Amino acid sequence: MKKLKAAAQELSDRLKLPEDVLLGSAKIVVTAGRKILIENHKGILEYSPDYVVVNLGKGKLCFSGQGFLVEAMNNEQLLISGALESMQWE
């Protein structure tokens, strides 16, 4: 499995393609500290209006803030709105 990932990484580098396309890596877009779009997530591990933990497969991403609301979620994308104060990768 590691050889396959290494080959995919090398192909991504050579073709100058984004990692998230070939490797399924997470892509996080934060817009004005009010909207958070996460692509290639593996689900929500913890949720409250002040704290959200998202499983990324290769770790988790923790958001602290106020008024978090899950606006949309499917197998590939997660959209959260609210006032983002901090973000931490674990």
Image (cartoon, helix red, strand yellow):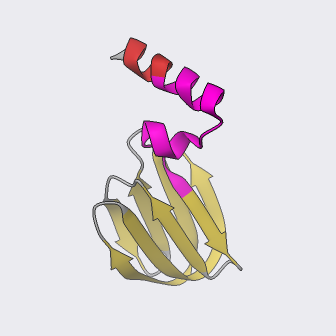
Identified at 61% across, 65% down, the residue is 29
- The image quadrant of residue 78 is bottom left
Between 75 and 67, the one nearer to me in the picture: 75
Q: Position of residue 54 (x, y in %)?
A: 41, 58
Above/below status of 27 relative to 24: below
Above/below status of 38 relative to 20: below
Q: Which residues are magenta?
A: 8-27
Left or right: residue 82 compared with residue 30: left
Left or right: residue 76 compared with residue 80: left
Residue found farthest to the left: 75
Between 68 and 81, the one nearer to me in the picture: 81
Above/below status of 31 relative to 26: below
- The image quadrant of residue 83 is bottom right
Q: Position of residue 70 (x, y in %)?
A: 39, 80
Magenta span contains residue 26? yes
Magenta span contains residue 25? yes
Above/below status of 37 relative to 45: below
- The image quadrant of residue 41 is bottom left
Residue found farthest to the top: 3
Identified at 44% across, 81% down, the residue is 49
* Quadrant of the snapshot with the N terminus: top left
Q: Main secondary structure of the magenta part?
A: helix
Identified at 57% across, 69% down, the residue is 64
